[in-house]
Amino acid sequence: MRILFIGDVFGRTGRDLVRAGIPVLTSRYAIDAVIANVENAASGAGITRETGDALLKCGVDVMTTGNHVWDRREALTYLGAEPRLLRPLNMASAAPGRGAFVARLADGRPIGVINAMGRVFMPPVDNPFEAVAAAVDRLSRECRVIVVDIHAEATAEKIAMGWHLDGRVAAVLGTHTHVQTADARVLPGGTAYVTDVGMTGPHDSIIGMERAGVLSRFVTGLPTRMEPASENPRLQAVVIDADERTGLARDIVRLDWSEKDLAGARRAGDDEQPL
């Protein structure tokens, strides 16, 4: 099973990249399932029904989130109505929605997805290590291939989650920082890992926002209005090649495609992979 996991989709720029990129990348890498972190998909903060439904129509099979999931009020009802939209499972049990889901691909094959959030430098949540381990036990009764999105600030916490689940899931993929890391690998037990998948959105920015407003806040210490940027769109993601017999990974490939790369691949019939 080939899985495409798209890093934090940021605003309209990110959504446009997803729409343009999924057909190209699905063809290039023979993708079976698409997962995307969408917590910043609506103007750079939160998720709405309109933006979520649009991403599902583009070919996203499961959507994960993180600490910004509540930034839009309508997410409270959308999470309860759309099972393919996850929130971190270690949030309070009273929170609407779910943190784990078994999706069925077009051919009926199952894939499990777990969404968790770290505790270091993040809003208060329950122990993610205990919560994820319990969810893996539950989902493994229904499917072999399981992917975990660990939405966390601290690299050490994400790395620890990778080792915690090595040999038990196909992949542990970090999100949240919007900065792609260069440590993608398959751990000794067979779990694909990367500390941060990166951001699908505008990269001539400060993690997605226009530079001027963010710089003003850092320089002056005063509150400023921040707006989503749009320059230098890039789609960052990973592709996991999972063995459906064992539920473990054979390989993980890190992707960083510009808008120009995607357009070129479409024109060329997707013959050569951009560097």
Image: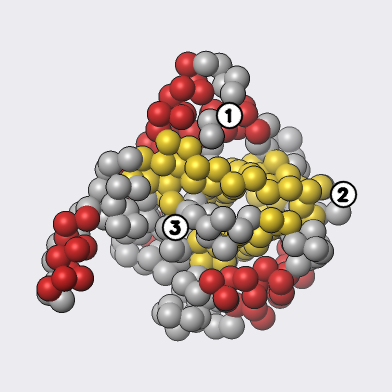
Q: Residue at x 57, y 63 (%)?
A: 195
In front: mark 1 or mark 2?
1
Give residue 54's position: percent from left, percent from top: 41, 40
Give residue 120's position: percent from left, percent from top: 48, 81
- State the separation of the CA atoms marked 1 and 2: 29 Å
Residue pointed to by mark 3: 179
In front: mark 2 or mark 3?
3
The amino acid pointed to by label 3 is Val
Quarter of image, res 211: bottom left
Which colour assignment does the render follow?
Answer: secondary structure
Q: Few, some or many C-alpha atoms within 10 Å of disc 2 (few <14, some 14-19, many ≥20)? A: few
What SS does tag 3 mark?
loop
Q: Quadrant of the C terminus?
A: top right
Q: Is 214 rendered above or below residue 14?
A: below
> Mark number for residue 245?
2
Q: Is 164 rendered above or below residue 71?
A: below
Would residue 81 be seen by someone viewing this image from the given angle? Answer: no
Task: Pick whichever, 167 or 97, lies toward us.
Answer: 167
> Mark number for residue 5?
none
The amino acid pointed to by label 2 is Arg
The amino acid pointed to by label 1 is Gln
